[in-house]
Image (spheres, helix red, strand yellow):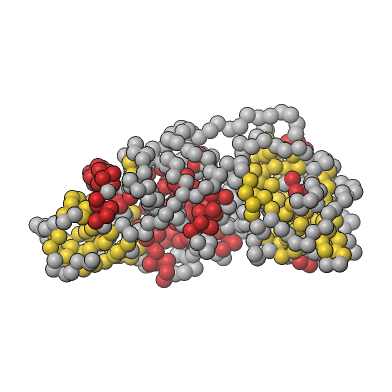
Amino acid sequence: MPRNPGEQFAGYTIIRLVGRGGMGEIYLARHPHLPRNEALKVLPADLSRDPMYRQRFVKEAEHASSVVHPSIVTIFNSGEYGGHLWIAMEYIDGIDALKLLRQNPRGLDTPTVIAIVRAVGAALDRAHATGLLHRDVKPANILLQGVGGPEPRVLLADFGIAKSEQDVSHLTSTNVFLGTVAYAAPEQLLGDPVDARADQYALAATVFELLTGRPPFQGAGTASIIAGHLQSMPPRPSTLRPGISSSVDAVFGRALSKEPDRRYGSCREFAADLEGALAAPQLSKEPTVRAPSPGPVPATYPQGPPSYSPYQSQPGSYPGGYPAQGGYPPAPPPPPTKRSGLLMVLGSVAVILVLAIAAGVVYVATQVSGAPTAGGTSTSRSTTAAGPETATSAAGTSTPRTTDSSTSPVNGPGDVQIGDCVGIATDSGSSTSVNASKVDCGSAGLNFYAASKIAASTSCASPQNSTLTFPDSTEKLCLTPNFYEGLCYLVPLSGGSLADYREAACASSATAQTVLARVTTRSDASVTCSGDETKWVFAEPESIGYCLIET
């Protein structure tokens, strides 16, 4: 029950209720002795009675109060009164980022986003250096003062579920998931041990929404959102907001990696790369994003809230295929270079697809050749729709995935525009027959850009382009692979099929007629690769360059 203005609580005088959520109520209250107002957070009675939570609350309140940073809401005092744990903190007379986003549903202006990621990144790193994790970074826990001015003040709030790096047990004896599903890292959703990299992931998911107006993963319910975090790549920000350079895509591709050791070594490192990418011209392509910092990175952070809508807890645990991660291991060394020569074939893979239409049925045949111009096609198997395909999770397990509802069959060159993406679904009845569909370029799994439409008798601009041809058509499509930096892909060798192209776990093994390659760099066609890497460059539909290394 809300407390009334003028009511006394632990010596504080209640002025008004300013926020309420699953983790308690926030009041503006007058300090018992000092001439100042503070934000008073009162936790629910049931949580206050939880022995495990009580023990941690006392320890973490003391720890959090010792963390001093200009972008962390200061904690003044804490205790228990009338069966309720409480915490008093600095009162911020401003607006939280969630409310600000609701006023700007298409995304906040770039200077404000930069100010937020810079300040919150520094705050998290400061807390991590003391061994404290936040575990619930989200727009509602970011407070701003002076919005619209030359330099708004940004603070990170909500100590409520802060967690010590040394304490890897669950936050409550009832095993309740504490965190917000829309921004939680895969390892946190699975109940695995978390460290500073989970906060970096949550910061990236938060900034993704502040920049584009939507979180990286959406769905009709909690389960589908969790599945997105565990199995899917987020859409590219450059496709969601006009004016954003594709340089930003590579930054989020790393910061939102499923595997913690592929993320940034610190939140400030992520902030610096994002700030640089946001300053890049729209037409510039992905720069080389800094490699993960070697060695361990400190872990964690706290904080308490003021005038904002506090956190809503969500149930969690999802039977996904995400690998358990414990502690904070150093970034893994680069994979050993294999001199088998298999990767050298990558530069000469070409694909011919023959599409025939008979009685309303689509037939697709593919063949991969080790030569830039392959001859002949394999026998196809008929299918009536682009049915389920198999997506490989980060753990290397296979889970069924249905083609996105926005897909449409590609029956001829006129079905796609240059820059659209084409997805390939495997026909379960044949190893050489596939279904081609137009898909969202940011959808899960591997897809291909429609690079160009050219005369059927001519060659694509790059020998690495795959080719999509159609009966009774004088045109064909050149396809450019849409690889993400840091991810691994199975790439077909001579005698393979276009169906052999797919995203795979980096720890998995290559299948027959394929090589497993990791994308070390995604940039433009001027990309520079090391002597151990293979370079693929494309001029269409835009300037794209990849460095690939066999794993």
- At x 55%, y 64%, the residue is 241
Q: Is residue 524 at all visible to an observer of this figure? A: no
x then y, percent, for residue 331:
50, 35
- At x 22%, y 63%, the residue is 27
Q: Quadrant of residue 298?
A: top left
Position of 139 relative to 188 (above/below): below
Q: Horizontally, is 114 left or right of 40 in the view?
A: right
Tally the numbered discs: 0
Give the farthest residue toward the front. 174
x then y, percent, for residue 458:
87, 55
Q: Nearer the viewer, residue 442 or 246?
A: 442
Q: Quadrant of residue 145?
A: bottom left
- At x 38%, y 62%, the residue is 97
Q: Horizontally, is 146 left or right of 349 in the view?
A: left
- Quarter that holds the N terminus: bottom left
x then y, percent, for residue 536:
71, 44
Q: Nearer the viewer, residue 338 or 224?
A: 224
x then y, percent, for residue 550:
68, 35
- At x 50%, y 61%, the residue is 221
Q: Is residue 192 at all visible to an observer of this figure? A: yes
